[in-house]
Image (spheres, rainbow, N blue to C red):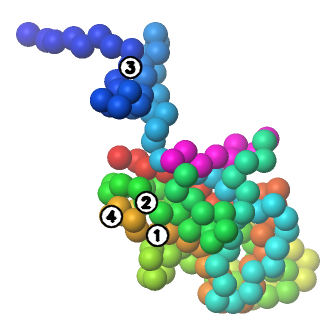
Amino acid sequence: MTSTLKVENIKHTNNTTAQTIDSSGRILTPARPSFKAKSSSNKTIEINNDVVFDDITTSGFGLHDIGNNYNTSTGIYTAPIAGVYFFQFCVYQNASTGAEVDLYLNTQPLGVGREFGSSSLSYNTLNHCQNLLLSANDEIKVRCVVGTAYVNYHVSSFSGFLLG
């Protein structure tokens, strides 16, 4: 025997919508923590400095911060609840130096975008993405640990979201 539950919305007792199902069966989770940030200007990031993506509002770039968990002053995302999250960043190596840019969980480096050597002709892309099991209040940031990174305000970004 099968059971069918027919609903359009699932809400918390405080009336916050947790899930909406449209007439085609697509499920929306409007309160799921998610962010995409970019820089408001081109920047050069020196060794041992955090990469701060300070813009989450400029239209036309898909920027957002659902849940207000990303700090545009520090560049740190704070996990609001425990769960599995996905993060990505994209920056460049400065044209004149090699670079290594790491994703950090609290004070621990986790994964890197690397480009060693130098080229005066181009800026090589440093990308990294991974999913992480986080506890509530864990902090994620991007940091330049070798050489010099370059942030282009049209292309460079940092984003993440709760998978579940």
Circles 1 and 2 in contact, beta carbons < 8 Å: yes
User: Amino acid under label 3?
Assistant: Asn
Judge the density around disc 2: few (<14), some (14-19), many (≥20) Cα neighbours within 10 Å.
Answer: many
Q: Position of residue 21 (x, y in %)?
A: 42, 19
Image quadrant assignment for residue 2:
top left
**Residue drawn at the location 74% of the way across and 87% of the way down:** 46
**Whole-Å distance between the Cαs marked 4 and 3?**
28 Å
Q: Name the residue under label 3.
A: 9
Q: Residue 79, which numbered label?
A: 2
User: Amino acid under label 1?
Assistant: Glu
Q: Name the residue under label 1.
A: 139
User: Amino acid under label 2?
Assistant: Ala
Q: Position of residue 22 (x, y in %)?
A: 46, 15
| Mark earlier in primary sequence (2, 4) | 2
Q: Position of residue 72 (x, y in %)?
A: 66, 63
Judge the density around disc 3: few (<14), some (14-19), many (≥20) Cα neighbours within 10 Å.
Answer: some
